[in-house]
Image (cartoon, grey):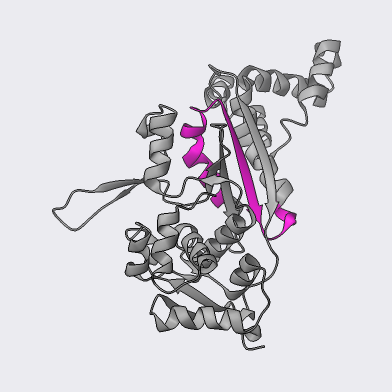
Amino acid sequence: MNISSSHLDALQTLGYTEEEARFLYIVATHSGYFVARQFVGFTGSHWGKRTTSFCNKLQNKKHVRRECYPLSGVIYHLFSRRLYSRIEKENLRNRRTHEVEFIRRRLAMLDFVLANQEYQYLETEAEKVRFFCGSLDIEKHFLPAKLYLGKPGSRPTVHYFVDKLPMFVSPPSPVVTFTYMHDAEATFPEFVHHLENYIPLFQQLTEFRFIYASRTDSRFQKASDIFHSFVKIPLESDIGDELVRYFRVRKAWDEKQYAAVTEADLIFRIQVRSRFSTDRFEGFYRGWKNGRITEEAIRHQFPVNDRKRSIGFDTFLLKKIGIAGDENHENE
């Protein structure tokens, strides 16, 4: 992570040490919220005077709001326009007040970035648009976007990558890594919806990586199945014809029409069965078998690929330490 010296200097002029300034830059850019344990982990310090002094300094300068949630403990919201303006990010929505579910995801995002500081992050909407449209020459209409309606009589505005999820590259490679933070309140349909929003952009990339992060590894297998069935398998291979063939062979085998199944069909069935075993493909199979989905409709779901792609999927286990009770250690 490259933080410009000018931004660090600007924060230090507000009365912060270089290490505190670096932490505040990361919080402002990637979250807007933090808890004391994240500062402790970042500095490698212990609970006690240093943490208390830092949090008190922020409050005395009116750079943060100290917010206490019944089930979440004390959370600090970095909201000062003056502080954000020092790092040229005064228009970031991180300064605004949000609901606790939003805050939980932002804390998860901060945990991820703090644990992966070696990467070069695309920090803002403008940087992301510049990277995809400028460096990779992708047209804007392929980017995930949301239309915002203003006051009556004003023109609506379009914003891109409104989820603000961490996204990074590892120079000199141009391969981008996308992330998704699955917090405690999120559901898998939300993950599917997120992927659907990004598929038009994914289709324009020859190579990319995707990291699914969660505070529990019990979600990892389900997330992997969803990603493979919605993204990796459809984009890496021409599966329309393969899926139809698999359905035909499977139906004949299930109905004990063995004379209609060749040895090559059996080998094919064994080879692809694990690829097409997820809920999505099972739904297609049931619909096709019952006559509700035609073979043409299935092929239409998976257009023929015009390029070879390499798509990586990884999981990342976020810290399991809860946010409740962080402040119990401050005065030790």
Q: Quadrant of residue 264?
A: top right
Question: In the image, which residues are magenta?
Answer: 190-219
Tell me if 32 is positioned left or right of 141 in this view. Answer: right
Up-down: is 170 above or below 30?
A: above
Report the residue at 43% width, 76% height from top.
64
Answer with the quarter of the image where residue 178 lies.
Answer: top right
Residue that protrudes farthest toward the left in the picture: 153
> Which quadrant would residue 88 be assigned to in this image?
bottom left
**Residue 94: x, y in percent?**
41, 63
Q: Quadrant of the C terminus?
A: bottom right
Would you say residue 217 sits in the magenta stretch? yes
Q: Nearer the viewer, residue 31 or 42?
A: 42
> For this view, does 17 lie left or right of residue 162?
right
Residue 323 position in % (x across, y down): 62, 73
Which is more toward the observer, 68 or 251?
68
Q: Residue at x 52, y 69 (%)?
A: 20
Residue 107 in view in this figure: yes
Q: Position of residue 171 (x, y in %)?
A: 56, 36
